[in-house]
Amino acid sequence: GAVVSQHPSWVICKSGTSVKIECRSLDFQATTMFWYRQFPKQSLMLMATSNEGSKATYEQGVEKDKFLINHASLTLSTLTVTSAHPEDSSFYICSASDPGLAGGYNEQFFGPGTRLTVL
Amino acid sequence: KNQVEQSPQSLIILEGKNCTLQCNYTVSPFSNLRWYKQDTGRGPVSLTIMTFSENTKSNGRYTATLDADTKQSSLHITASQLSDSASYICVVSARGNNRLAFGKGNQVVVIP
């Protein structure tokens, strides 16, 4: 149980285009979803937290107009990288949580990640 | 300064040998500590999760320990296998919020 999927697993795009990444909780309802970015040999860095039906909360330094997050249902959140540039190339990972799972640990279940390469 | 520090940054071990990874944290108030395994190009997969009252937890060949007084944890891998090659990430959760503090990971390479 508690499986999270991401699509696509990798994407290559031209500079200036927009890319949408989907994150789905497959067997549970995720009240909260998180988006992370990870550069090589670095920690996961939280970009934003989203609750179903409300606006996402962005971390300091993350441009909300560039990284659009939509959490329209309890099983789906999307991250759209608008006008992507080479410096946006990274590994994007989502996670989902439901306080009712995992014995109250409020554990986050991670997706497999999406590798974005902007040329 | 990162709230979660891991050491060693990387290590190479022979297949079949044991190894121990270290995690020190400053997160307070403490809620729980998790160890994740992250294969290259994949998302983190949970190995163990421990609360304040737990000082050891095992998952197969992985055994995690926690000393909440000294704010230290370790992950011991027994009889390593080639498939254990991965980054092992220590993650600490603070009580009262859902924010996680991530270490940079211990990069383990198991060679035959």
Image (cartoon, rainbow, N blue to C red):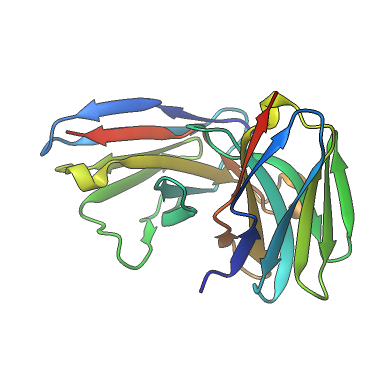
In x, y percent, where is residue B48?
77, 46
Q: Which residue is located at x 78 percent, y 56 percent?
A: B74
Q: Quadrant of the C terminus of chain A?
A: top left
In x, y percent, where is residue B72?
76, 66
**In the rendered view, would you say A116 is above or below B52?**
above
Q: Depth check: A14 or A68 in front?
A: A14
> Is residue A52 in sight in this rendering?
no
**In the rendered view, would you say B4 is above or below B83?**
below
Q: Which residue is located at x 67 percent, y 69 percent?
A: B25
Q: Which residue lies furthest to the left in this view?
A: A16
Quadrant in the picture for residue A59: bottom left
Q: Depth check: A78 or A45 in front?
A: A45
Left or right position of A85 against B33: left
In x, y percent, where is residue B102?
57, 58
Quadrant in the picture for residue A4: top right
**In the rendered view, would you say A21 is above or below B54?**
above
> Is residue A79 in sight in this rendering?
yes
Q: Quadrant of the N terminus of chain A?
A: top right
Left or right position of B73 against A45: right
Q: Which residue is located at x 51 percent, y 32 percent?
A: B42
Left or right position of B6 against B53: left
